[in-house]
Image (tube, rainbow, N blue to C red):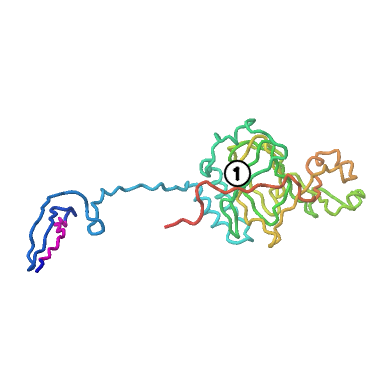
């Protein structure tokens, strides 16, 4: 009669550390008795999948938090409070508040620096017909916050802001601004009758009399300028003397759907469409101009870029 022996391995494991403490080679003899063939004590390796590895000490990683400059968040909150609807015309109190906030805003508050290559006069390679660039910081139905970047000698052509109030803050650079308001038909300062206009004027229904409101050079930092739907220089033109950045609060934003499309103009001296010789030679000749509505000019085309400055919007709690 044959005697069968079964050989197998028996291991003793330390459950607290997950290590092999004792490995024995066993023989199972007939009758169910165990006999140790070889005994080996060891402390190598961990039992995979049975007992977890010892974890390394936990390290807390600090996440970088982007802090919104107080002035920028204050501007957003004030805009929300000011522009309650697209039809809002800010009250004197709201105008004063927004101007105070904008006057205190610095380029760094929107992620800009005068040390950037773009703002170094004469350092950029001037390209013919170089475009103006803009970025939208925030936009809703009631208002928008935008920054316009004008390269050296860049121009935003003479245009209007139908039914809109606009706060403009020159953040960096030096630029020339020219602005106009329409002359009311009943304005007593000047009498414009049909016979005071020549045939060219009569034939051109797109020509209208306007009054010069501003014709000056602005250098940052400077006070905020404001224009309203019917006054304050609603039609204006910007020409950059050095590279510029202009922050605009526009309420409400342009919208073709709601009749707020942008129109462009060419200005003509008063004498160009007038037969009033006394006014042509007087001081009024420099005050009153004719604005001719024109097709969208080529230099009005702008390139939009993503806003990468501090985030602006509803505060998160």
Q: Which residue is mark 1?
A: 169
* Percent coordinates x, y for residue 246 in the rendering: 61, 43
Q: Is residue 61 left or right of residue 246?
A: left
Q: Residue furthest top?
A: 122
* Percent coordinates x, y for residue 220 in the rendering: 60, 37
Q: Is residue 97 left or right of residue 49?
A: right
- Along the line of sight, the residue nearer the viewer: 209 or 157: 157
Is 218 drawn above or below residue 263 in the view shown? above
Query: How many labels were placed on the picture?
Result: 1
Which corner quadrant holds the N terminus?
Answer: bottom left
- Label 1: which secondary element: strand
- Along the line of sight, the residue nearer the viewer: 266 or 89: 266
Q: Residue furthest front?
A: 1
Q: Residue at x 24, y 53 (%)?
A: 53
> Is 12 included in the stretch rendered in magenta?
yes
For the stretch drawn in magenta, the main secondary structure is: strand
Q: Which residues are magenta?
A: 3-15
Residue neighbourhood size for the residue with mark 1, other residues' Cα within 10 Å, grouped as few (<14), some (14–19), many (≥20): many
Is 163 drawn above or below residue 242 in the view shown? below
Q: Quadrant of residue 129?
A: top right
* Percent coordinates x, y for residue 33 in the rendering: 7, 65
Q: Quadrant of residue 317?
A: bottom left
């Amino acid at each position: 009669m044959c005697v069968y022996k079964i050989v197998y391995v028996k291991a003793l494991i330390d459950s607290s550390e997950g290590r092999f403490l004792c490995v024995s080679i066993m023989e199972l003899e007939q009758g169910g008795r165990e006999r140790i063939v070889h005994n080996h004590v060891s402390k190598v390796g961990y039992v995979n999948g049975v007992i977890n590895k010892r974890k390394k000490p936990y390290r807390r990683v600090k996440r970088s938090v982007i802090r919104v400059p107080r002035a920028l968040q204050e501007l957003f909150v004030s805009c929300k409070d000011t522009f309650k609807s697209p039809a809002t015309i800010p009250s004197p109190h709201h105008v004063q508040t927004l101007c105070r906030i904008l006057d205190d805003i610095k380029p760094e508050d929107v992620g800009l620096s005068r040390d950037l290559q773009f703002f170094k006069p004469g350092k950029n390679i001037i390209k013919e017909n170089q475009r103006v660039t803009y970025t939208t910081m925030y936009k809703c139905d009631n208002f928008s916050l935008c920054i316009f970047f004008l390269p050296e000698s860049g121009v935003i052509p003479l245009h209007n802001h139908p039914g809109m109030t606009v706060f403009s803050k020159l953040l960096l650079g030096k630029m020339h601004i020219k602005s106009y308001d329409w002359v009311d038909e009943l304005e007593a300062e000047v009498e414009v009758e049909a016979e005071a206009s020549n045939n060219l004027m009569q034939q051109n229904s797109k020509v209208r009399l306007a009054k010069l409101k501003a014709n000056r050079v602005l250098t940052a930092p400077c006070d905020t300028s404001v224009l309203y739907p019917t006054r304050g220089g609603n039609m204006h033109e910007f020409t950059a003397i050095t590279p510029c950045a202009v922050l605009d609060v526009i309420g409400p934003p342009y919208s073709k759907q709601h009749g707020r499309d942008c129109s462009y103009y060419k200005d003509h001296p008063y004498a160009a469409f007038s037969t009033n010789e006394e006014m042509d030679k007087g001081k009024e000749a420099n005050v009153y101009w004719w604005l001719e509505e024109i097709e969208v000019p080529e230099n009005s085309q702008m390139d939009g870029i993503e806003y990468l400055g501090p985030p602006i919007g509803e505060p998160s709690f």
